[in-house]
Amino acid sequence: MDSEHVSEEAPAAGGDPDRRMSMTVVVECECGWSARGDERTAIEMAQVHQRVIHGQEISREELMAGARPRRDRTSSEPAPDR
């Protein structure tokens, strides 16, 4: 595994209705690390990453400014050609 690029994915929301309704996002760090999941969990994971790995505190607002929605292929979309 490339140590320069680490990606973490938040666990499925399960039965928590607040988490099911939350937007799924991708938060990426300049170092190559990324988190994907519901908005709350991905932001929390990114804040922990910034604090532990980079020794920096970063606000939710700063992280959300750089976050992007996660695009998942739905069952109605054709599978990509291989």
Image: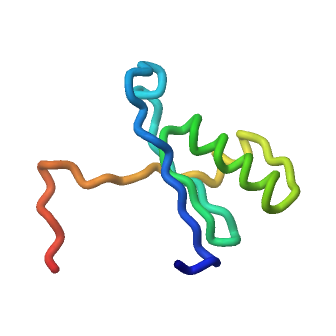
The answer to whether residue 62 is left or right of residue 75 is right
Task: From the top left corner, tell me how far across and down residue 37 is, in percent.
Answer: 48, 45
- Compared to residue 34, the image places residue 62 above or below, namely above
The answer to whether residue 58 is left or right of residue 11 is right
The answer to whether residue 60 is left or right of residue 41 is right
Q: Which of the 4 quarters of the picture holds residue 53?
A: bottom right
The residue lying at 63 percent from left, 43 percent from top is 43
Q: In the depicted view, which residue is nearer to us: 44 or 69?
A: 44
Task: From the top left corner, tell me how far across and down residue 82 is, in percent.
Answer: 16, 80
Q: Which of the 4 quarters of the picture holds residue 61?
A: top right
Task: From the top left corner, tell me how far across and down residue 2 is, in percent.
Answer: 56, 80
Task: From the top left corner, tell me how far across and down residue 36 is, in percent.
Answer: 50, 51
Q: Residue furthest front?
A: 1
The residue lying at 77 percent from left, 55 percent from top is 50
Q: Which of the 4 quarters of the picture holds residue 16?
A: top left
- Compared to residue 1, the image places residue 77 above or below, namely above
Q: In the depicted view, which residue is nearer to us: 59 or 8?
A: 8
Q: In the depicted view, which residue is nearer to us: 24 or 52?
A: 52
The residue lying at 66 percent from left, 40 percent from top is 44
